[in-house]
Amino acid sequence: MPSEPNAEAGPAGSSPWRLALRQLRRNRVALAFGGLLILIAIFVLAAPLWAEHVADTGPNETHTLEKIDVDGEKREVVNVEGRPIGPVWLGAGGKYFLGADGRLGRDEMVRLMYGGRASLFVGFASALMATVLATILALLAGYYRGWVDTVISRTMDVIWAFPVLLLGIALGIALALGGLKIGPVEIPSGSIWITILIIGGVLVPYTARPLRGTVLALREKEFVEASVAQGAGPLRVMFGELLPNLASTIIVFFTLAVANAMLFEAALSFLGVGVQPPDTSWGAMVGDGFDLIGSAPLLTILPGTMIFLTVLSVNVLGDGLRDALDPRSKVRLEAHAGIAEPEGTAV
Amino acid sequence: MRKLGLNLLVLCVVTSSALALAACGDSDSKEGGTLTGSYASFPDYLDPGLSYTQEGWTAMYNTYLPLLTYAHANGAAGGEVVPALAEDLPEIGNGGKTYTLRLRKGLKYSDGSPVKASDFTSSIERLFKLNSPGSGFYTGIVGAEKFAETKTGGIPGIKTNDRTGEIVIDLTAPRGTFSNELGMLFAALLPSGTPAKNLSSDPPPATGPYEIVKSEAGRGWSYTRNPVWAKNNGPLMPDLEAGNYDKIEISVVRNDSTQVNEIEQDQTDWMQTPPPADRYAEVKDKYEETQFRVENPINLYYFWMDVNRPPFDDLKVRQAVNHAVDSAALERIYSGALSATHQILPEGMPGHETFDLYPHDMAKAKELLAEANPADTEITVWTDNESPNDEAGAYYHSVLQELGFDATLKTINADVYIPTIGNVSTPDLDTGWINWYPDYPNPSNFFEPLLSGEGIVPTNNVNFARIDEPKLNEKIARLGEEPLGPEQEAEYAELDREFMDLAPWVPYGTFTVSTFVDSEIDLDSVIFNPTFGHDLASFQPK
């Protein structure tokens, strides 16, 4: 392919978004993983169809004592020693395609599809929550500075100071019994929203701090001064001037937050404080399958692989978006991608 | 001179033959050497006053002896209370309120100090000073409740005479299970002056055939023979096994699959916990009869239903649920390690007579439910998060959903599960999973705490069904005052049926454990006591 000189600049008159799209189209690796992410999304969205028309069972229906016809041979879903049937592929017309999930005899394929819905939903919803909250806090801290910045930044520091997984586990255990009541809003214990709130809340500082740095830098730019000179109020400046200029950074951090939230959800569910049974997620399935890792390793490997592929897809796509949206960005993604990293260095 | 030489030669031959035979005899007795074992975790305590788990009791069965103990035998025979430090079983007088025992003369602790009758008083007082979980078994002694509060002034209900070895215990009310309670590890004698603090890392002197010489929390512990056993305590207590190994070394191996591998490779002689569910069938198939044996401790796994809350306030609903749950499914969920039962008293418990009022019949269950037609079908099902109990809870949840209930499953961390469901103020305590391991093999230990209305308390409640039937309460109280005999056993069997008629629970099985030893141990020699677990003194090399 011939190289295009000054490709990043693009033709005169193109909008930044159009330029970014063009840039993204050239990044084949990012596109491939974006495609994989879409395939995964289709896979999990098809869960009710597969459950109803192929597997003929719901994700939580138990079949411990049932027998199925596999290529004309009657086989127990769970044998007398509690060992689940392995993958039968299409031998039973799609039922137990990936075998049973354990001693309860639930269909592993159906659980994998429904578990993926939960994992993706928690990942995207908590990342969205973390990003929205982080953006608001970053705008407030960066715009007002002074004591507002001090209060917000120190609060973020306090949350950041906790080991993130321990904080998540502590919140998960504390909210597991009584649920959450904030004024008129009541979330019952066991609800997936508890997990989303925990992960979303814990991840806020990881996005808010770098965004705050960016807002502090933008705050000094001429276009902001011009806007203030024209009489724009704080809200107008924050959401009319600063926010559009933060968009590309926010999108990049959102994709990173999705990946981190999915991993965090997997860890919490593996430890039993994330998605609550009988519902499942890929992380919970890894935990459930771990009990049988010697005799039925697929029960751990399959959901683990799905987590790996999804997180990898989101990360690579996020990298591609970063390159496309802000090719000159000084954001060092590596610094923010790892939760263990203590400080972001965004400008 | 020549004759003398011949005689000497004959003497030498006879002597050397005798020595050779003696040496062979030593070899046949299979004594000496080191027994190695593994635990999945360190016991709760290595202090007889504090330990309240079978892991701890197994570890101290042969080190700390109470006045009475449980026979070192398998199965039901192991439930028999026999004398240990006491000369005989207690004389019971004053209408069941006074127990008189006599300490065997000449007993010593492993440090060489004499065992005194007054050590019993100080050992019981130590329980209260430690706020031991076992202190509750002895609050029926006159003055014990006051001592529990003040921790001073002694317990006037215990009178001892160090010269004669006599120990007289006065109770505030007759208690038919008191001999069982005197046989618990909590009542083991320790020297007067033993500090009232957790001594797990520096265990006190022993009275049994072994003493703990090293204890490293989280890593393991080891025993050697009690130096005073062979010449002193052993001959005084001939019914107790001396043990076949000079040393016993126990290490903590957290991965149970690694424990199995070590036994297969003859690196460890024995593992305390059963093989993991994942490998249970493999181990059973490969080693049953040679190195592996299924044991039947006394316990019960069941689902409770709160009989005061709709829809379980309706007998027909409870009966329907009993018909709907299928023990066969639960046997698979427990990987074949569950022995199905459908009554309160499990096999091996005195008073057990097998019956099943509610055989599995889903059609019958649905019919009963249709008759009951409960208005409130919204229920919460509770279980803990330990496998496979969490799966048992999920199975029960799916059965209730199949019956038409709008059931919500609540899975709680095992560490806080019992306090949570034992707290009356916890909302939505409709039904759930639980198990019960009795403290001693007496049926009273099932009915009194679990099914008597008098046992219902606001916190730490274990009558989860909250059943309170005055007539049955009276019967439980009366039987609890009487020492266990054939008549009482028959009455307990009847009580079992009476409660199952009311169906407050869905009992579904007894969880079996196992003995798994390496190829060097004689499996037949190993004793598994239903209360104390494996008897380390019984292990013999092949």
Image (cartoon, rainbow, N blue to C red):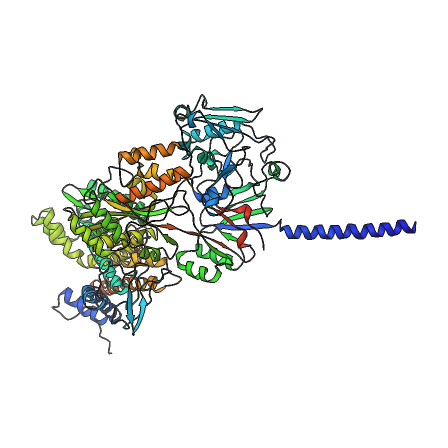
Counting from the top left corner in percent of width and height, residue A232 is at 8, 49
Q: Nearer the viewer, residue A214 or B214?
A: B214
Which quadrant of the figure contains the C terminus of chain A?
bottom left
Name which quarter of the figure residue A286 lies in. Answer: bottom left
Counting from the top left corner in percent of width and height, residue B146 is at 39, 23
Counting from the top left corner in percent of width and height, residue B14 is at 79, 51
Q: In the rendered view, does A227 fall on the left or right side of A151? A: left
Name which quarter of the figure residue B132 lies in. Answer: top left
* Total marks placed: 0
Q: Residue furthest right?
A: B1
Q: In the rendered view, does A289 fall on the left or right side of B119? A: left
Picture residue at 54% right of the left edge, 34% below the top: B85
Which quadrant of the figure contains the N terminus of chain A?
bottom left
Picture residue at 49% right of the left edge, 50% below the top: B38
Picture residue at 39% right of the left edge, 63% below the top: A295
Q: Nearer the viewer, residue B275 or A231?
A: B275
Q: In the rendered view, does A218 fall on the left or right side of B494? A: left
Residue B504 shows in the view: no
Counting from the top left corner in percent of width and height, residue B98 is at 45, 26
Q: Nearer the viewer, residue A78 or B271?
A: A78
Q: Residue furthest left?
A: A231
Residue A187 shows in the view: yes
